[in-house]
Image: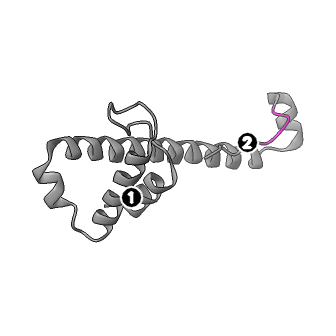
Amino acid sequence: MNPEILKYIETHSIGLIGSGYGYGFNSEAKIAKTVMLELVRAERAEFLLLRDEVVAKWWGKMVATAQATLDALEEKERVYRIKLAAWERLTVEERKVLGLGRAPTKPKG
């Protein structure tokens, strides 16, 4: 599994956690998330995911949400780099004519 996805899951409270996949981030969900992260890192998660459909569904949603978020952040960063490169190629006069007073702002994330 992609280490970036694991790091994102570890450091963020994804809303698909809890008994109803969205009721918040309770202590049982924190424990479950921690255990799953350790099982994945130790390459031992397959036995649990294959045997328990609820866990497989929950973990699948966690990974999918993390991947979608990372993909969106990557796309924002790509667009920022393109805009910044274009802005830097323009002269001060060209920026004034185009109404571009300041450089593009770096996306948060």
Quadrant of the rendered image containing residue 100? top right
> Which secondary structure is most common in the magenta stretch?
loop
On the rendered structure, is 25 left or right of 37? right
- Classify 10 Å Cα crowding around label 2: few (below 14), some (14-19), many (20 and above): few
Mark 2 element type: loop
Quadrant of the rendered image containing residue 24? top left
Whole-percent x and y of residue 74? 51, 48
Q: Which residue is mark 1?
A: 34
User: Residue at horizontal 15%, vertical 43%?
Assistant: 53
On the rendered structure, is 65 left or right of 59? right
Tag 2: residue type? Answer: Thr
Q: Which residue is mark 2?
A: 105
Front residue of 18/16: it is 18
Whole-percent x and y of residue 51? 10, 52
Mark 1 element type: helix
Q: CA distance from mark 2 to mark 1?
A: 35 Å
Q: Earlier in the sequence, mark 2 or mark 1?
A: 1
Magenta residue check for 71: no
- Classify 10 Å Cα crowding around label 1: few (below 14), some (14-19), many (20 and above): few
Tag 1: residue type? Answer: Thr
Magenta residue span: 100-105
**Picture disc at residue 87:** none
Front residue of 54/80: it is 54
| Above or below for 12 versus 102 | below
